[in-house]
Image: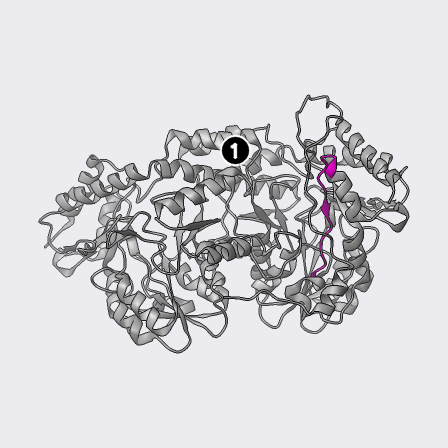
Amino acid sequence: MIEETRLPDDVMAELARILPDPEPPLEVRLPRIPVVEEAMERQIIPVADPRLDGNELRYLTQCVQSNWISSAGRFVREFEAAFAEATGCRYGVACANGTTALHLALAALGVGPGDEVVLPTFTMIATANAVRYAGGTPVLVDAERDTWNLDVARLGDALSPRTRGIVVVHTYGHPVDMDPVLELAARRGLWVLEDAAEAHGARYRGRPAGSLGRAAAFSFYANKIITTGEGGMVTTSDAALAALGRRLRDHAFSDERHFWHKYLGFNYRMTNLQAAVGLAQTERLEEFVAARRRNAARYTERLGRVPGLTLPVERPWARNVYWMYGVLVEDAFGISRDELRRRLARRGIETRTFFIPIHLQPIYYELFRGQRFPVAEELCRRGLYLPSGATLTEAEVAYVCDVVAEAREEGR
Amino acid sequence: MIPVFAPWLSDNVRRYVLDCVDSGWISSLGQYVGRFERDFAAFCEAGHAVATSNGTTALHLCLASLGIGPGDEVLVPDLTFVSTANVVRYTGATPVLVDADRRTWGLDPEDARRKVTPRTRAVVPVHLYGHPVDLDPLLALAAEHGFDVVEDAAEAHGARYKGRRVGALGRVGAFSFYGNKIITTGEGGMVVTNDPALAERAAFLRDHAMDPRRRYYHPEIGFNYRMTNIQAAIGCAQLEQADAILARRKAIATAYEVGLAGVPGLTRPPAEPWAESVHWMYSVLVEPAFGRDREAVREGLRARGIDSRPFFVPLHQLPPYRTDAPFPVATALGATGINLPSGTGLGPDEIGQVCDALRALTRG
């Protein structure tokens, strides 16, 4: 049996200052949550939830009635075409989830043992794991304190003769400043893969996230801006890469004869059912993005009056889609991030802590031993995100902001 | 065209899918996932079940949960779908190919014994096309050498070995619920085991190995192999029909046996006295006495509106696993075997058409 990686006590003691406390229990809301205009009855305000009141059910019913529920149905192709178009790409390769999309893209790009792939340390674990699944070695870059994306100025220091490519993550919906990344990559002969799991509909200088590098990987998990329950997609305008991705996704079946496989493939297929939901969701992508941006503006307006919070930014060249509305709880706020979370939870408000940087994860601790990334560690220590789901109402945003302000005033 | 397989879905499929959408629970967090796991464990007469995105990920999860990795060897049958060997490669271990057993078409326990080395960590018997492998000699071999038996039961939902449902007869086993499987969720898979600690590990690794108490904290390299609530909802509806499905499958096999009686040169599927096959694919071997080779038979069936499949290409012939070592039984089965239409909804008329077509094609 594999043993979990256990870190030495002195290491754990140091990490304890950075890592978040365990999740606080979420209590059922108090009766004073304002009645919302849509008369929606909520027990709590969740960080994320989907809206499935478009064509989702109609398309799902078509799947069941036509007996096409596996990955061989027509919605998979229609969803791929519709989402690729929305992303400004020629091709979409739908996958079982965002992690498999990342792995598939890296495998199709030819990452293997001995190859280094540069990525931000401030990201979800799958970004690094996907590199490992392909046999490559992740190399980390610290974050910027304002966009929370990888620090482009430090990117050059991470490159070595073994570097094959760069994975950028559009963190919480704000696009990475791509031009310098693409210039550096072009100069060094590297590919750029966008991890766009958090950035459906985001734009960089007017161009959609997902179309900015050689390929991109999206996630459609239920908490994402558009969802298929679980799901993912590789988008690209490179015909050969898309074709290889399709083949690797389906066990590397060949066209020559039945059950003939020329290389190691995977089963990363998406079902027709997932794709049916995805197509209906894609039809409403702009509407969902607009709703998120509207709620973000409301948060920013109200929380801007609360001292001690650092709010998300939107650079002049960016369209931030605020997948999650994150804030940093600074010392001036008076209580810690974890204490704020506990107080919000007691009032029925769900929150999440920011990512724990890759270099602090037990499984990667040895690999990055001695490397420190102070900005990412600070984001991990201070960051939380507030309810940001598709059904979040104006009244609920106001309630959350009031409770945040009250939590601060209650003091220590 | 009579297809090789088509799903057989009940009205409850639609009802449960509607329920997922109405409740907003379509991800892997919905209530149907847990219910499907409990129901499927009960169906397999096993203690625990862990749902996954598909059969390949289920089998990978079995090996990963056992801690199999670089330097280890895993015995797999030469005649199987390619993912049985691929999952061994995903873990970094080396697949070691074992010839087929004429009696069951599954892996030959005698050849398995010959292939054991000090590095052997597991054997993966595949219950090919629905007929169980002879497990007792494998379980004895594994106990003798201290390695595990991991059943690949992707093709054998409900099959019985000496009266017991396959899946959790070894340390752990994997099922597939692809659209062409006996029980389907479109795409889907399941790990089954009687070992609660192993089930817990599989569930942990399935969800990025995230610490249950601390979000985004990962003590190990895990995967996203989660099943969606919608897939599980379909699985629940399918399991409600399991008895009817298995009864229909038995009837289909019987109809073929009767319909093909007296046709020369067609070897019928295995039927060991200790086995209850579920005939995922009702399959025959086209012998020289039939008078045409396998490809000509498939061609003739296609011309009569009947789809079929050749047997899997033996792994030792595929580029990633190519070796000149002899696998005489798997080679012969791979070259002569054919899967006939076997969908659960297949009626007696359609089976009659297939049998008539085969009879017309014989030159024996």
Percent of width and height locating residue A260 = 38, 60
Which residue was labeled with disc 1? B20
Majority secondary structure of the magenta segment?
loop
Q: Position of residue B26 (x, y in %)?
A: 55, 37
Boundaries of the magenta span: A346-358
Q: Nearer the viewer, residue B302 or A180?
A: A180
Residue A320 makes an appearance in the image: no
Percent across and percent down for residue B12 are 40, 30
Q: Is residue A349 magenta?
A: yes
Q: Secondary structure at mark 1?
A: helix
Determine whether B37 is above or below B127 in the image.
Answer: above
The quadrant where residue B255 appears: top left
- Say whether residue B72 is left or right of residue A338: left
Q: Chain of mark 1?
A: B
Q: Is B300 rendered above or below residue B134?
A: above
Which residue sits furthest bottom? B118
Which residue shows up at 56% across the image and 40% down it? A229
